[in-house]
């Protein structure tokens, strides 16, 4: 069926080329291109593919889960709302990350999980433009992030071989779309020099080992560009934070002043899911 998916792969690869090559199309070109895309591929809900302008339809929007307070001021992990808790979680106190703070727009569940999965694996990459406002809203709405002045948005790198297989790096598309919306330049400052095993199924320590030494500063990035800069790392999903921390470590070594991390979604551990549910319940009573 012609409209079976939000974006068929054939059109997708042509679009990838466009996106990877372009600087920033001027307003008119972008609007014409967008209306052509919309005419042939009418917008659909990113959660259930129901036709409609909204990113998430009336049925999916209420299923999106924010990460409720209280959460760690550093890594953003939900705390037990009934326990006495400090600002920073035990994990961050024991092993302080190289980033100042990490935040995610939503929990990696339900319609958000579907949207990210389709964006990445069904190559619905026009969704980067539709998903980026969620990141922009998180920057404006989070008390820690809203007072920062970021110099660059840096996408989490993908190994070139994996990028070639997928056709694009989802973090690059998100960073570029976010850059257009919040006028912070996107800079592909990092590259992945080693092809690491997929992180799925690994625990936090294994993930840290897996990614160690795999990321470096791109030779195309002049050292003075990063020196003293304030950087916001951008990715789709935050799982244990091992990749984010490795990216932040490399940036800090390159004399970046401060690193922050922002993702569309956060994968919660089972106990964190419980804390989030309890916090929502507490907020209701
Ligand atoms: Zn829907
Ligand atoms: Zn923490």
Image (cartoon, rainbow, N blue to C red):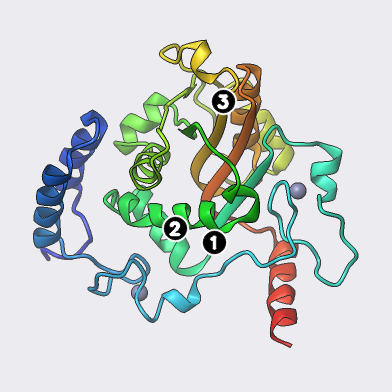
- Marks 1 and 2 sit apart, C-alpha to C-alpha, by 9 Å
> Looking at the rendering, which quadrant does residue 13 occupy?
top left
Residue 58 placement (x, y as % from top left): 37, 80
Labels 3, 1: front one? 3
Q: Is mark 2 within 8 Å of ligand 1?
A: no
Query: Which numbered disc flags the more N-terminal residue, 3 or 1?
Result: 1
Q: Which residue, as the protein is rendered here, is positioned at the far right?
A: 84
How crowded pointer 1 is (Cα within 10 Å; few <14, some 14-19, many 20+) is rated as many
How crowded pointer 2 is (Cα within 10 Å; few <14, some 14-19, many 20+) is rated as some
Residue bearing mark 1: 106
Residue bearing mark 3: 229
- In percent of the image, x 47 and y 52: which residue is there? 135
> Left of 69 or right of it: where is 30?
left
Secondary structure at badge 3 equals loop
Residue 140 appears in view: yes
Secondary structure at badge 2 equals helix
Question: Are the two marked residues, 1 and 2, in contact with CB atoms closer than 8 angstroms?
Answer: yes
Q: Is residue 262 above or below residue 156?
A: below
- Marks 3 and 1 sit apart, C-alpha to C-alpha, by 27 Å
- In percent of the image, x 50 and y 31: which residue is there? 151
Question: Are the two marked residues, 3 and 1, in contact with CB atoms closer than 8 angstroms?
Answer: no
Q: Which mark is residue 67?
A: none
Q: Which mark is residue 134?
A: 2
Residue 47 placement (x, y as % from top left): 37, 68
């Amino acid at each position: 069926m012609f409209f079976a998916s939000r974006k068929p792969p054939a059109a997708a690869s042509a679009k990838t080329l466009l996106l990877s090559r372009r600087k920033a199309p001027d307003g008119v070109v972008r609007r014409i291109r967008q209306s052509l895309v919309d005419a042939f591929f009418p917008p659909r809900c990113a959660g259930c593919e129901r036709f409609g302008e909204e990113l998430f339809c009336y049925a999916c929007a209420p299923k999106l889960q924010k990460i409720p307070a209280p959460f760690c001021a550093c890594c953003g992990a939900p705390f037990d709302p009934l326990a006495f808790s400090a600002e920073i979680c035990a994990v961050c106190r024991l092993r302080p990350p190289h980033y100042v703070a990490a935040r995610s727009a939503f929990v990696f569940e339900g319609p958000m999980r579907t949207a990210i999965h389709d964006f990445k694996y069904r190559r619905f990459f026009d969704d980067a433009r539709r998903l980026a406002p969620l990141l922009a809203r998180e920057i404006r709405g989070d008390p820690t992030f809203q007072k920062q002045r970021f110099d660059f948005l840096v996408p989490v790198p993908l190994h070139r071989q994996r990028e070639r297989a997928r056709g694009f790096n989802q973090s690059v598309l998100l960073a570029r779309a976010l850059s257009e919306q919040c006028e912070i330049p996107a800079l592909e400052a990092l590259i992945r020099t080693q092809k690491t095993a997929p992180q799925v199924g690994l625990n936090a320590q294994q993930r840290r080992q897996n990614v160690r030494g795999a990321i470096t500063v791109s030779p195309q990035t002049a050292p003075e560009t990063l020196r003293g800069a304030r950087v916001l790392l951008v990715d789709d999903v935050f799982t244990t934070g091992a990749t984010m921390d490795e990216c932040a470590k490399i940036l800090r070594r390159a004399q970046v002043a401060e690193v922050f991390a922002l993702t569309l979604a956060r994968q919660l551990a089972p106990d964190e899911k419980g804390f989030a549910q309890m916090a929502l319940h507490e907020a209701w009573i």
